[in-house]
Amino acid sequence: MKLYDILKEIQGSPKAIILAGAPGAGKGYILRGLDLGGLKTLNVDDIYVPMLKKANITLDLKNATPEERSAQAKAIAAANKELKADLDTTIGKKESFILDGTAASYNKASQLKKELEEAGYEVFMLYVYTDLERSLKQNQDRFEKSGGEDRSLAPGIVMKTWKDVTKNFTPYKELFGNNFVSVANTLGDEKLTNLEDIMVKYLEPFTPKNTKPKTPKEQAKSDARKAKDREEIKKFLSDEVVKDIVNSSVSKEEAQSKLKAFLS
């Protein structure tokens, strides 16, 4: 009997699995070995990508024009609104599901966990860590490797998401307790660890062109925000931070076993 069939037999105990991880971390890779069958999966990309295609907007977001970036921003806002409606409907029906996203916002994830538990759900988090360089490389290659069928995000967005997800590791571990498991997909010793080198290789080639000029006040605010983000990223690139995450993580097989136990 498949895990999904077992799950359907459990009365009054809907389950929710929240995925956390930067783009390219390999969350789908972990789930593919679980034989989840028809378990509902909610992913904003399943709404966003078709929306971009229908509007004839490029999926190569790392090379987008200012006009394309504006259209993309409107599309992701609309996609997130539709995802929220789908999520509300799913919770209302007490359906078990997987929320496949980054969980970059701790506040949103913790609020969702609270709402789910109040609705009678058991909630689990699968956290997948990857190096900043791997996340940027996977994203950079995604559009081309898919033959233009999948999107590549702007690398600046990927870097900020990686920072936020990495920052959330310990808070999520504490929030979910026994219903938390982490897996580390890392590059090994060959990865770049200097932020300036990473930016030269993965961000500078895709610097947005023909952007609207900022006022001096807007520019100063932007510069201060970027400087703060970069200081945080440098801290998260340190061996100590990475070592804590990696040492707390388990193998793909162990994570799958824990997920099976949760669902069964």
Image: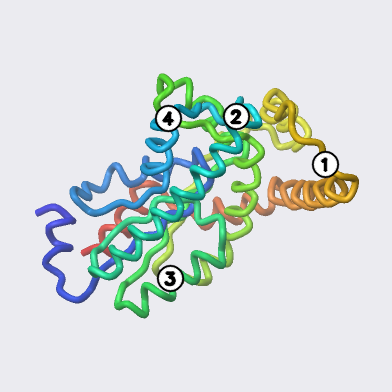
The residue lying toward the viewer, choosing from 121 and 177, is 121
Tell me the SS state at disc 4. Answer: loop
Coordinates of residue 55 in the picture (x, y in percent): 44, 32
**Mark 3 sits on what residue?**
113
* Other residues around mark 1 within 10 Å, as few (<14) / some (14–19) / many (≥20): few
For marks 3 and 4, give the CA distance. Answer: 29 Å
Using the rendered view, name the quadrant where residue 30 is placed: top left
The Cα–Cα distance between marks 1 and 4, rounded to whole angstroms, is 32 Å
Judged from the image, the secondary structure of the residue bearing numbered disc 2 is: helix
For the residues bearing labels 3 and 4, Cβ distance under 8 angstroms: no
Give me the residue at 36% from left, 76% from top: 117
Residue highlighted by disc 4: 150
Residue at 52% over, 57% down: 248
For this rendering, which residue is in front, 158 or 54?
54
Dot 2 amino acid type: Lys
Labels in figure, total: 4
Question: Is residue 249 found left or right of 198 in the rendered image?
Answer: left
Compared to residue 91, the image places residue 78 above or below, namely above
In the rendered image, residue 243, in percent from the top left (x then y), is placed at 62, 51
Q: Amino acid at mark 3?
A: Lys
Q: Quadrant of residue 73?
A: top right
Q: Given the current orientation, which residue lies at the most extreme bottom position? A: 118
Along the polypeptide, which appears first: circle 3 or circle 4? 3
Residue that numbered label 1 is attached to:
214
Few, some or many C-alpha atoms within 10 Å of disc 4 (few <14, some 14-19, many ≥20)?
some
- Label 1 or label 4, whichever lies nearer to me, is 1
Quickly name the residue at label 2: 62
Please report whichever mark, 3 or 2, sits nearer to the chain's N-terminal start. Answer: 2
Residue at 18% from the left image edge and 56% from the top image edge: 3
Residue 64, position in %: x, y? 60, 27
Q: Earlier in the sequence, mark 1 or mark 2?
A: 2
The crowd level at tag 3 (other Cα within 10 Å; few <14, some 14-19, many 20+) is: many
